[in-house]
Image: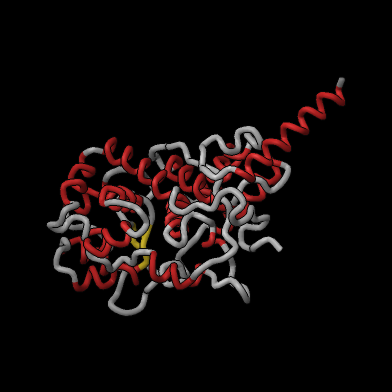
Amino acid sequence: MASNSFFVLHVLVMFSLASLALSDSLSPSFYNHVCPQALPAIKRVVEDAVRKERRMGASLLRLHFHDCFVNGCDASILLDKTATIDSEKTAIPNNNSIRGFDVIDKIKSEVDKCCGRSIVSCADIVAVAARDSVVALGGPTWEVPLGRRDSTTASRTKANNDIPPPTLDLPALINSFKKQGLDEKDLVALSGGHTLGFAQCSTFRNRIYNDTNIDSTFASQRKANCPRSGGNTNLAPLDPTPALFDSKYFSNLVSKKGLLHSDQALFNGGQTDNLVKKYSTNLGSFSKDFAESMIKMGNIKPLTGNQGQIRVNCRKVNV
């Protein structure tokens, strides 16, 4: 009788694994049968990492964003440089600023241990870690559609071309997001991710010294830690509460205190002004739209079915 039960269980597991391999669509319940422990394991590691360093939450959120904007949400950003991999880690938007790789490695190790094998993709880990980071810092939760597979390539060139730089004006921002299937509401809501984290002096120097649509006191405060030359990696918070998911990022824009040129572009007499104003006084509305836009962004060109692979090591293509 016991051997019969084991056989049935074995058949069910093999059937579930086969279903995983053949699935062409994303679903929040993708791992429910084959490894129900996976999502709790990701949450535990993320919460621990954010507890140790609050800034890590913003870094994991940014990792997902920078992954999805380059050939879709396929964990290509995690691949190290090799003779055949043109790593995105050294692209201009990522070089010496993208973080969180060690946390992803730790999550992968824990999840594989829980699941007994490499079932959960690195791409799904990045997507869930972004959600759990937002929640850990007081933000909304959402069901993450799952079932992405991992790329076997990366593109530093596409990272340089497709991740929007902090110098863009509103029309260029709208176009950049439109190329990814995202609209103006997504642009404003996802930019609200800058309610968390910091930026390096090199990304906002031109704004604080040359832009005119900036509060003069705010500019002076930022100049104290960001000289005209040198100090490129000095950090400044993207909003007054960089470890708390709130609406102060948008209040700052209304007060002309956006840190990045591309932030302030959202509130500068253009068509996104009204939405920025709305979010600045309505955290509930922002939180709801942010969650919806994160799901939409997470659905950009995923690899599914028998496309790509499930990497054993998130930094390397399986051999």
Q: Would you say 6 lies left or right of 159 here?
A: right
Q: Position of residue 136 (x, y in %)?
A: 45, 41
In this view, the residue farthest toward the top is 1
Q: Is residue 133 above or below residue 199?
A: above
Q: Is residue 294 visible?
A: yes
Q: Would you say 287 lies left or right of 137 here?
A: left
Q: Is residue 2 above or below residue 31?
A: above
Give the residue drawn at x 43%, y 37%.
142
Instruction: Name the residue nearer the viewer: 65 or 72.
Output: 72
Instruction: Name the residue nearer the viewer: 296 or 244.
Output: 296
Question: Quarter-wise, where is residue 87 in the image?
Answer: bottom right
Q: Is residue 47 visible?
A: no
Q: Quadrant of the C terminus?
A: bottom right
Q: Position of residue 300 (x, y in %)?
A: 43, 52
Q: Position of residue 268 (x, y in %)?
A: 15, 58
Give the residue drawn at x 37%, y 51%.
196
Question: Quarter-wise, where is residue 199 in the image?
Answer: bottom left
In this view, the residue farthest toward the left is 269
Give the residue drawn at x 44%, y 48%.
299
Q: Position of residue 245 (x, y in %)?
A: 35, 44
Q: Quadrant of the N terminus?
A: top right
Instruction: Name the residue nearer the viewer: 255 or 118.
Output: 118
Q: How is the image coloured?
A: secondary structure
Give the residue drawn at x 61%, y 74%.
84
In this view, the residue farthest toward the bottom is 229
Q: Would you say 7 lies left or right of 101 here?
A: right
